[in-house]
Amino acid sequence: MTFFAPKPRDLDSAHVILALGLAVISLGQALQHGNGFLNGIALLYLTISLILLGWALFARPTFGHLLFVKISFPVLLLGLLLQIYQLSFAYFGDSEFLSLLSTLWQFRAGILIAGGLAVASLTMHKWMSPKWQNVLTVLVLLTLWLSGVWLIKHVPYPFIDVFVFHQNSGNALLNGVNPYTLTAPNIYGEKYIYGYGAELIQNGVLTIGNPYPPLSIYFSSLGYLFGGDIRYSHLFAFVLSGALIAFLHPGRGSKLAAYLFLFTPKSFYVIEQSWTEPIVVLFLTAVVYCAIHRPRWLFALAGLLFASKQYLLFTFPLMLLLFPVKPPFPAWLRRFSEIGLVALAVTAPLALWDFPSFMWNVGEAQWYQIFRLDALSYLAAYARVTDIQPSQLIAFAMLALAFFFVWRFLPRTPDGFVAAFAWCLMLFFAFNKQAFCNYYFLVIGAMCCALSALYPKIPSSFS
């Protein structure tokens, strides 16, 4: 049997759907067991997910095609049912658990209603028309939005520094103050000084106002402007991302992919904790959607994607999978320049307002972030066992290795791009000095988007 293709091929093997879907479910379980922090079970699930994703993208088995076709949908549906159960009955966060016990049933009811509608929308076409399937999907999205609003209102002050950064930034922008010139309190107390690094704290106060790029601040501040809480923006991004995945292609396959993302057991934990990865997932899914349906807007969305998070600059070479080098070269170069100009246009206003403060918050301070022994990372596990802290350059070496594999084996298509995005970031995070729930939530979003994009190539697996 031939396990690796000698040249880039289409991801049209029946095993891809099953392995990719199981990789999503397994990574969700890694986050479920420990909230994204390191423990043995979480590391095991992370390893399983990484193996499954690698097998989906690079293996070319010559056996089991009919078996993979027959079992893909029911197996992934069972995984979805597990996720709905976990999201409904396992508490999603840790900020105000005791105070929510008397009313938590309201959130759980919302998730169960949304889950029931989701499963109903996956009914075969001979029993339910595509029109009604779409209606149910919209109702799922609406119910999840309302559940998210309940969450935000019932956990108004999550105990996490990211929330402080963005709330302060939203208030600062509305009052004409540069967020990058602010300082922030160390809400964790003196005992947590080690969690930031000595360079980031002076006299008990953080020397950073917001460590995120301007686009992230703009987007988050919209929630502060319209609802008094930046997390409304993140919730909007989360639900809209699910909609883009669900309607990327007609049929049940794209809907199932969207539900695996939306009902990831820790999805609402990400919203509660104010992490900005839902914004990144939104721009990523928008890039894939435009690549398939609205190519004219692709350069603009790609520019927004790479302006949304610092580490995404390291994945910029993946754009060669969407824009392969080909003549006429001036036109190809112009397209890449347009992507860079969009990213620069949304970054420059806030960056140039006070460039030294911008560079400290978004650039220099990131290098002072310490090695975290609680990160869901192989390096953290190694450091715990040996008391030796590995070099953070290992993460970049793994990213380079990931680039080699995707360039060698994956197709130059939208599904190839987003699958490569998931693979590269998963390896990068798994061998990094910091990797937590929000990091892998982005990987889950990318894998679900890839699953939806691949569905039409193997429609019989979702019949």
Image (spheres, grey):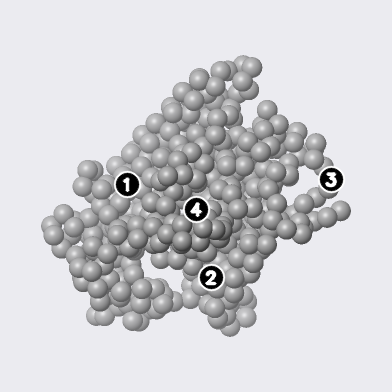
**Label 2, on which residue?**
432
Eyeballing the image, is 38 above or below 415?
Answer: below
Say which amino acid is labelled 2.
Asn
Instruction: Compute the Cα span from label 2 to label 4.
Output: 16 Å
Which of the two residues, 411 or 159, is positioned nearer the viewer here? 411
Q: Which of pointers 3 and 2 indicates the residue nearer the eye?
A: 3
* Mark 3 and mark 2 residues within 8 Å of each other at the beta carbon: no
First in sequence, mark 2 or 4: give its number: 2
Q: Position of residue 237 (x, y in %)?
A: 38, 45
Q: Describe residue 351's horizontal placement relative to residue 143 as left or right.
A: left
Residue 268 visible in the current orientation: no
* Mark 4 and mark 1 residues within 8 Å of each other at the beta carbon: no
Instruction: Compute the Cα span from label 4 to label 1.
Output: 17 Å
Q: Secondary structure at mark 4?
A: helix
Which of the two residues, 140 or 82, is positioned nearer the viewer here? 140
Residue at 59% x, 38% y: name it. 80
**Label 3, on which residue?**
63
